[in-house]
Amino acid sequence: MLQARLLRPYTEKFFRAAGLAPRMRVSDVGSGMGDVALLSADIVGPAGSVLGIDRDAAALDNARRRTEEQGYASWVEFQTGDLDEFTTTDQFDALVGRYVLLYQPDPSSVIRSLLRSVKPGGTSFCRNQVLVSGPKEVSTERGGAACPAAPTGP
């Protein structure tokens, strides 16, 4: 939880600058203990919604408990699943994550797949560190060069 407290102000500034706003429907990928989902919930408020996705069921149990304790259970939920296999019929305004892409064997493939659940005109932004060349924030928008648009159609 120390990491969450230390990173929250920077992540919040980054998310707000990238366009996260009240009433948005957000998917938090690699949700873990729910730090980013809860931050997103603070930003989107009860008129929005947040779905956190992670492969670690035990971490998500803690995230659910924290969500209940903070009174966000009516607009924040969590689902267990691998990001590279996740599918949904829901459409989100934003796809967010923090320190998740570095744990994916093929981050570009995972992002392309997840972008299928982002509405046209929606956005995707992840805060990661690239240790090869030093700390760096990576922001991607649907259709941007760093994160190509998901294929359309069936």
Image (spheres, helix red, strand yellow):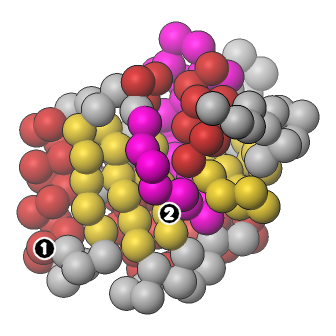
Q: Residues within 10 Å of mark 2 (few under 14, many from 20)?
A: many
- Label 2 sits on residue: 26
- Label 1 sits on residue: 68
Counting residues from the start of the chain, the first of labels 1 and 2 encountered is 2
Which residue appears at 74% of the width and 57% of the height?
Answer: 120
Q: Pick the residue in front: 104 or 120.
A: 120
Farthest front residue? 154
Position of 100 relative to 96 (above/below): above
Q: Tell me whether the residue at label 1 lies in contact with that at label 2, contact meaning CB atoms closer than 8 angstroms.
A: no
Answer whether residue 154 is magenta in the image.
Answer: no
Q: Pick the residue in front: 128 or 51.
A: 51
Q: Residues within 10 Å of mark 1 (few under 14, many from 20)?
A: few
Q: Pick the residue in front: 27 or 70.
A: 27
Farthest right residue? 145
Answer whether residue 105 is magenta in the image.
Answer: yes
In the rendered structure, which amino acid carries the disc numbered 1? Glu
Identify the magenta region. Answer: 87-108
Position of 13 relative to 116 (above/below): below
Task: Determine whether, in the image, residue 13 is placed left or right of residue 40.
Answer: right
Position of 123 relative to 126 (above/below): below
